[in-house]
Image: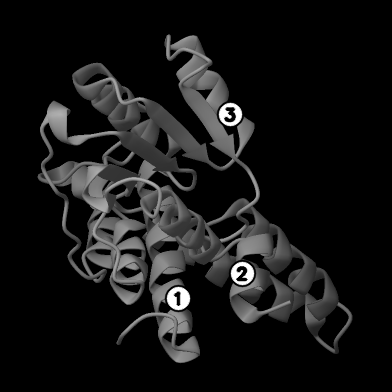
Amino acid sequence: MSLLGSIKFIGGPGSLGFLLACGVVALLLRRLPKGRAVAALWLIAVCGSYLVLALPSVALAIAGCLPAARSDTASARDIDVVVVLDGDNRRGRLREGLRLWTESSPRRFVVSGGEWLVARFREAGIPRDRLEQEAGAATTREQIDWVAQVASQVPAERVVLVASRLQMPRVERLVQSRRLHVKLQTSPIDTEPASAGWMLWIPSYSALRISRDALYELAALEYYERRGWIAG
């Protein structure tokens, strides 16, 4: 398993999986000479880091390190296919997908990912004969490979690709590397943290999630660049 795959499996800093892994490390440290003190210091450092990552000011700063990504504006008449990529901030992707459906009523509406989003779109009223699921792609790179196949069947500029504003920088670079001319539409964060005032310094779970997802995307961008899948 690759380093990025391991991070995705366990969860990066800010995730519950990573916190659990740190707890296992603490148990192992207890076996060392004077291990109780070392383990206690380790857990204090981990918990302190999570509190820092949960600060809206820190979350926004980390997200701000991601490259800017474009978000195209398309009229209803210009859309034949909407593809919603599954991933972080599913509810934001759901809202943006429903907005595009309402405004354009595309002939194909595709979810690349798991059943949760498909079920929510179905419950929202998208007809079964228009709603499709692509469940074979396991990574963002594989999702874009699949989108390239869709774009070869219809004019690429009539395909709209939806991803969260955190994932979109990586999506855009993958699209550029394949010379696709699909339209890109960013979706919002599920719950935006405070962006001004004293609430910037109050930890929140929504801010922790943004820190977690943004850190993952920064690591993924670096990994994709090293592998030569996207331009640096």
Residue positioned 17% across, 65% down in the render: 68
Query: Label 3 is placed on what type of residue?
Result: Trp
Asked if labels 2 and 1 touch by Cβ distance under 8 angstroms, the answer is yes
Q: Going 41% across and 40% down the picture, which residue do you hit?
A: 84
- Residue occupied by mark 3: 116
Answer yes or no: is residue 117 visible.
no
Q: Percent x, y for residue 221?
A: 39, 76
Q: From the viewer's perspective, is residue 103 above or below residue 110?
A: above
- The mark lying in front, picked from 2 and 3, is 3
Disc 1: which residue? 219
Q: Residue furthest right?
A: 31
Q: Characterize the local packing of mark 1: few (<14), some (14-19) or many (20 or more) Cα atoms within 10 angstroms.
A: some
Q: Quadrant of residue 92?
A: top left
Q: Nearer the viewer, residue 81 or 155?
A: 155
- Picture quadrant of residue 91: top left
Identity of the amino acid at label 2?
Ile
Q: Measuring from the top left, give residue 219's x and y in whole percent.
A: 45, 75
Query: Mark 2 highlights which residue?
Result: 7
Quarter the C terminus occupies:
bottom left
